[in-house]
């Protein structure tokens, strides 16, 4: 969906920058298969996640041509509809699929409106509204990223046992970061952490959202 949006808006100066919060060996094949026309990078140590407070994928940050954040990190056109999946057949009810597509379309239309109208778009937040948005507990989150990077370093040295201790501590300090958890979690042949451990963690959310709904108004 991002390639289509990029192609339709690139003459307006719009650029998509995709950041994979993953290991190169897991992310590279997906990027190469998609062959997008916009820049894609792999951030194995989650520097971008730390800077912009990203906790899941897909999330997006809107940044204008002067480098100012127009919308803080938020779910980018995704919904919790996947939680209604038939886990044996990997299928979704038609109603859920239609709702998911409607949300994606609404989000892409909002991006397009902002690109065309700039700060006059109803979807562009002003600085005051961005500053008033709730922030994470910074001390715990900062410590979590430190443990995460140490775990990454230890894993690259082959010290997996020690690395796991720090991965676990990172997830304890920052339980909302699915990106951290996913990178250290068991993965399938496709390189995706979507197995039993993932569904157990999703089910533990109860009524809490996996993808927090957003207000585009």
Image (spheres, rainbow, N blue to C red):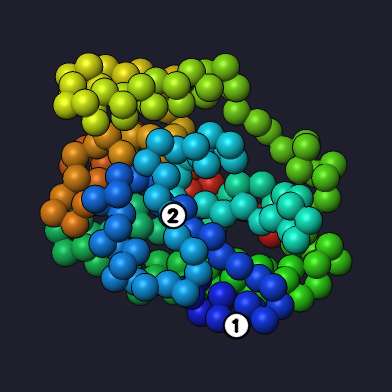
Q: How many marks?
A: 2
Q: Residue at x 48, y 49 (%)?
A: 211
Horizontally, is 66 left or right of 83 in the view? Answer: right
Up-down: is 41 above or below 44?
below
Q: Quadrant of residue 202?
A: top left
Query: Is 73 in front, or is 150?
Result: 150
Q: Residues within 10 Å of mark 2 (few under 14, many from 20)?
A: some
Horizontally, is 160 left or right of 72 in the view? Answer: left
Q: Nearer the viewer, mark 1 or mark 2?
A: 2
Q: Which mark is residue 151?
A: none
Which of the image's four quarters has the C terminus?
bottom right
Query: Is 181 in front, or is 34?
Result: 34
Residue at image mark 1: 8
Q: Which mark is residue 41?
A: 2
- What is the spatial separation of the Cα atoms under label 1 and label 2, in whole angstroms? 22 Å
N-term-proximal mark, 1 vs 2 = 1
Which residue lies most toward the front here?
Answer: 157
Dot 2 lies on which element?
strand
Residue 83 coordinates in the image, percent (x, y): 34, 53
Dot 1 lies on which element?
helix
């Amino acid at each position: 969906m991002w390639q289509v949006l990029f192609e339709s808006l690139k003459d307006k100066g719009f650029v998509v920058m995709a950041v994979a919060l993953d290991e190169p060996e897991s992310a590279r094949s997906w990027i190469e298969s998609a062959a997008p026309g916009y820049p894609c990078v792999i951030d194995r140590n989650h520097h971008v996640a730390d800077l912009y407070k990203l906790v899941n994928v897909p999330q997006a940050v809107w940044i204008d041509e002067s480098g100012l954040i127009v919308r803080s990190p938020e779910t980018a056109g995704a919904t919790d509809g996947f939680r209604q999946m038939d886990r044996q057949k990997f299928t979704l009810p038609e109603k859920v699929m239609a709702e998911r597509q409607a949300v994606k379309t609404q989000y892409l239309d909002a991006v397009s409106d902002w690109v065309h109208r700039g700060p006059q778009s109803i979807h562009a937040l002003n600085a005051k509204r961005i500053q008033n948005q709730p922030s994470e507990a910074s001390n715990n989150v900062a410590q979590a990223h430190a443990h995460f990077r140490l775990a990454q370093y230890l894993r690259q040295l082959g010290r997996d046992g020690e690395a796991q201790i720090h991965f676990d501590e990172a997830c304890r300090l920052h339980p909302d970061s699915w990106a951290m958890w996913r990178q250290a979690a068991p993965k399938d042949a496709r390189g995706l952490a979507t197995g039993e451990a993932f569904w157990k963690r999703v089910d533990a959310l109860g009524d809490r959202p996996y993808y927090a709904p957003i207000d585009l108004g």
